[in-house]
Amino acid sequence: MNRYALLYAFLLLVLPAALLAQESEQSQTLPEEIEIPSSRPDAPATKAPDQTVLQSTAEKMPAEEAACRRRLLATGTVFKEHEPLSDASGCSAPWPLTVTRLPGDVDLRPEAVMTCAMAEATADFVTDHAEPLAREVFEEGIAAVNQVSAYVCRPRAGTSTLSEHAFANALDWGSVELTDGTTIAVRHYRRSEPRRARLMAELRKAACGPFKTVLGPGTDADHADHFHFDMAERRNGGTWCR
């Protein structure tokens, strides 16, 4: 065997073994700058704390609150649970809801936080009174109720007594939008606008009973541009409509 054949045989035996050893050594060492993530970047976020609160409160929900929610769902109202409300000043609502849509696909704009009792009264009022009145006066349904105040931790104007808004027990209507796009604001109307004036007057009249308090234009300066509806408890189930 000549020297070239010996060299070729040497290369066949020695080089593969050297290469395998080098590869094995490299595979056992990770570069120091590479960090292995603890989870995938698109992994779902940890459940928000308020969801945990909602779950725990739902388990303790009084029977009347659960029954109210079942009735509310049956009306077609769209809502979700809201975490309990509480403030050092006394404002509170232990079982509030966030309502986004009323029966008949009537949007509530913006969404409003209120008690289930207030939501149910509003849903029934829209179905039994507001929608039929709009069709009677304008031959159009209601597309949206534009509210200007729901839960707000504050006293009544000019007093130190907490408002029903402070208990998520009130909703103020600023205007209604009809299905043809017409928006009718809550305010005084001239004789030249009889249909608008009639709708506002009829809505206000019909609200006394379904709601325990009804205030609006003419009551005082604070209510010149909206209806205030609430479910305040009164003696013998009475109402206060002004």
Image (tube, rainbow, N blue to C red):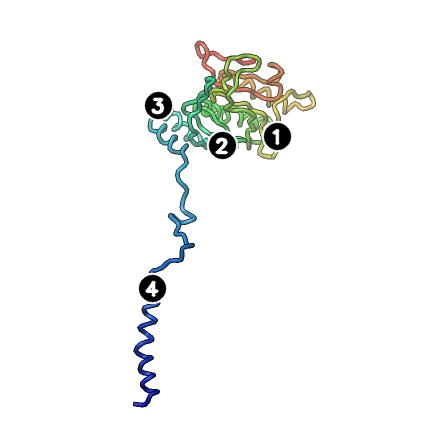
| Disc with the residue nearer the chain's start (1 vs 2) | 2
* Residue type, mark 2 in image: Thr
Give the number of the disc on residue 100: 2
Question: Which residue is most to the top?
Answer: 235
Q: CA distance from mark 4 to mark 1?
A: 77 Å
Percent x, y of residue 212: 49, 16
**Residue 183 — which label?**
1
Give the foreground label among 4 and 3: 4
Instruction: Give the label on residue 62, or none.
Output: 3
Question: Is there CB contact under 8 Å for labels 4 and 3?
Answer: no
Residue 186: percent from left, percent from top: 61, 23
Q: Nearer the viewer, residue 56 or 40?
A: 40
Report the amino acid beneath label 4.
Glu
Vertical relation: 233 (above or below) 135: above
Task: Please identify the quarter of the rendering in which residue 159 is found.
Answer: top right
- 10 Å crowding of disc 2: few (<14), some (14-19), many (20+): some
Q: Are marks 3 and 1 in contact (CB under 8 Å)?
A: no
